[in-house]
Image (tube, grey):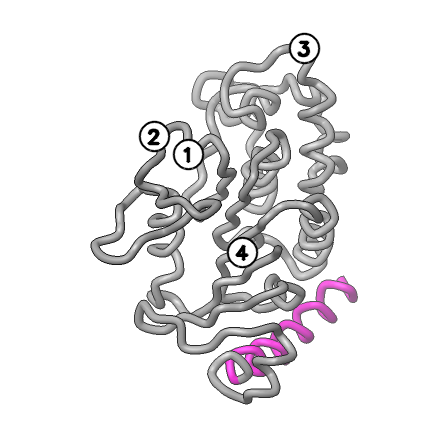
Amino acid sequence: EKIAIVGYNGAGKSTLIKLLMRLYDVNSGQILWNGENIKNFDPAYYRKHIGAVFQDYKIFSATIAENVMGGEFDKKDEKTVLDALDRATFTEKLKTIDKGIYANLTREFDDNGISLSGGEAQKIAIARVFAHPYDLIIMDEPSSALDPIAEFELNRSIAEYAKDKTVIFISHRLSTTRNADKIYMFADGEVIENGSHNDLIAQNGKYAEMFNMQAEKYNKNFETAVVI
């Protein structure tokens, strides 16, 4: 199931995800995983089943492969890394890098290290969730640094990869969430609307207002990107 959590900045979207990840524990009520309270699981064990891309992701002074795998890289993981980068739509950039996945990122320890743009770095972070068989994938503003065309291509790739997985998107850019199975609109830490995109548009509430405001701007940006 593809679930979208939407709302303006400060609505409580990211706090919800931190609760799901057990970075915080809830003060009342409970969060269930397959019917069991997540507090009953060892946090490290529980988090191994969740792949998350947060807005404050980090790119490490290591090879592309090590960045994608989240640490140690073995030669046998090469195909996994390449497939993950392809799903994250990083392949075209990779073709321009002499050492490929063995190139070092950042120049902190290597004067010849690769410096990535914001959008390129974000794709490396996203590739990490494609490199492991997670049960749940959480994407916190996954396309915030991408232009409209790159955003469209990435969203399509994520949807194709995650057909049999649960994916939670957190975003205030509704082009990312339009095709979700269920959308939850947050405001002031509470769910104020929920349903499919078509359901919420028909309700003509806060979600519809937010979507219509963004649609005009998004279309203009998309047309500009195509012309360029």
User: Which residue in the protein does label 2 denote?
Assistant: 42
Q: Quadrant of the N terminus?
A: bottom right
Whole-percent x and y of residue 226? 77, 64
Residue at 49%, 43% in the rendered image: 53
Contact, CB < 8 Å: mark 3 with mark 2? no
- Look at the numbered discs 2 and 4 and tell me whether their residues touch, using CB distance below 8 Å: no
Report which quarter residue 75 is drawn in. top right
Residue placed farthest to the front in the image? 35
Type of amino acid under label 3: Lys
Q: Is residue 224 magenta?
A: yes
Q: Nearer the viewer, mark 3 or mark 2?
A: 2
- Three-letter amino acid code of the residue under disc 1: Tyr
Q: Are marks 4 and 1 in contact (CB under 8 Å)?
A: no
How far apart are labels 4 and 1 at the CA level? Answer: 19 Å
Q: Secondary structure at mark 2?
A: loop
* CA separation in Å, label 3 and label 4: 32 Å
Q: Which residues are magenta?
A: 209-228
Give the amino acid at mark 4: Phe
- Residue, disc 3: 75
CA distance separating discs 1 and 2: 6 Å
Relative height, residue 62 to residue 53 (above, below): above
Q: Callout 4: few (<14), some (14-19), or many (20+) C-alpha neighbours within 10 Å? A: many
User: Residue furthest toward the left?
Assistant: 27
| Amino acid, disc 2 | Asp
Where disc 4 sits, the SS reads: strand
- Mark 1 sits on what residue? 46
Which quarter of the rendering shows the C terminus? Answer: bottom right
